[in-house]
C-alpha cells in the first residue's frame, strides 16, 4: 500500500477515535489533505544533500566571516508531533571555499523538514556545513517557539528556545564568537 494511502487510512481511524465522523462533509477530504501535508512536512527525509548543494562550492580567497541570519524554519517535535518554528542564524569563516548563499537556507530546510529536536537540528546544520566546506569555523544559533510547550503541558506562551553549535574558530576564539553573536543580535526581529 502506498504511503499516502496508509496515512489517509490512519487519519480516518484517528478521526473516528477522536469521536468524529470522517464521512462528515467538512472531514471528507481531511485524510487526503493530512497525507499531503505530512509528505511536505517530512520532505527532508527524501532530499539528497549532494543534489541540494549541486556543485555550488567555489574556490575563493576569502577569510572573512559570512553570516546568514533570520532564516525561517519549520519543524516537528519528535516527542509530540507538534510544530516548532523560528529563525536560524548561520555563519562560517571560509578556508579557500565558499558556498552559494541560497544553499545555507536549503540545508536548514533539509534538516528541519524531519521529526526533530532543536538541539540535534542545530548540530546537524553546523556539522553539515563543516563537512562540505572544511571552513575555519562554523556557528549556528536557532531560536524557536515550540507548540508542545505553548499549546499543551506547561502552556508557556511567551518563551522560546535558543540553541547553538560552534565549531573551529567560533569555539576556540572568544572574539570571533562574540562578533558572530553581536552580528545576529543587531536589529533583532525575533
Image (tube, rainbow, N blue to C red):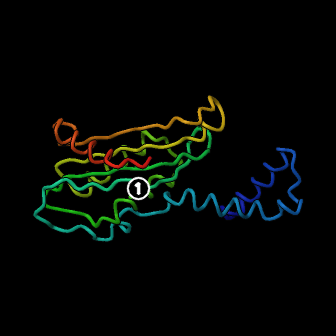
Q: Secondary structure at mark 1?
A: strand
Please identify the residue farthest to the top as the structure is shown. 154
Q: Quadrant of residue 104?
A: bottom left
- The one nearer the camera, 178 or 111, is 178
Residues packed near mark 1 inside 10 Å, few (<14), some (14 to 19) or many (20 plus): some
Q: Give the left or right position of residue 7, taking residue 139 as reference.
A: right
Residue at 51% in and 48% down: 85
- The one nearer the camera, 118 or 184, is 184
Residue at 38% in and 62% down: 49
- The one nearer the camera, 65 or 24, is 65
Image x and y of residue 118, in percent: 46, 41
Residue at 32% in and 51% down: 90
Please identify the residue farthest to the front as the structure is shown. 187
Q: Which residue is mark 1?
A: 71
Image x and y of residue 189, in percent: 42, 49
In the picture, the quarter occupied by the N terminus is: bottom right
Q: Quadrant of residue 27?
A: bottom right
Residue at 13% in and 56% down: 63
Image x and y of residue 169, in percent: 17, 42
Amino acid at each position: 500500500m502506498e504511503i499516502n494511502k496508509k496515512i489517509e487510512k490512519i487519519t480516518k481511524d484517528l478521526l473516528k477515535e477522536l469521536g468524529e465522523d470522517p464521512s462528515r462533509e467538512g472531514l471528507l477530504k481531511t485524510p487526503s489533505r493530512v497525507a499531503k501535508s505530512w509528505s511536505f512536512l517530512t520532505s527532508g527525509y527524501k532530499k539528497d544533500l549532494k543534489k541540494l548543494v549541486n556543485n555550488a562550492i567555489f574556490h575563493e580567497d576569502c577569510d572573512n566571516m559570512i553570516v546568514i541570519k533570520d532564516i525561517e524554519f519549520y519543524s516537528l517535535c519528535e516527542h509530540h508531533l507538534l510544530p516548532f518554528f523560528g529563525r536560524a542564524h548561520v555563519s562560517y569563516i571560509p578556508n579557500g571555499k565558499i558556498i552559494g548563499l541560497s544553499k545555507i537556507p536549503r540545508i536548514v530546510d533539509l534538516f528541519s523538514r524531519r521529526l526533530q529536536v532543536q538541539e540535534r537540528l542545530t548540530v546537524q546544520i553546523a556539522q553539515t556545513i563543516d563537512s562540505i566546506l572544511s571552513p575555519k569555523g562554523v556557528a549556528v544559533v536557532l531560536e524557536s517557539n515550540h507548540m508542545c510547550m505553548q499549546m499543551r503541558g506547561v502552556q508557556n506562551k511567551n518563551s522560546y528556545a535558543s540553541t547553538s553549535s560552534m565549531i573551529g574558530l567560533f569555539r576556540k576564539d572568544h572574539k570571533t564568537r562574540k562578533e558572530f553573536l553581536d552580528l545576529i543580535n543587531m536589529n533583532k526581529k525575533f
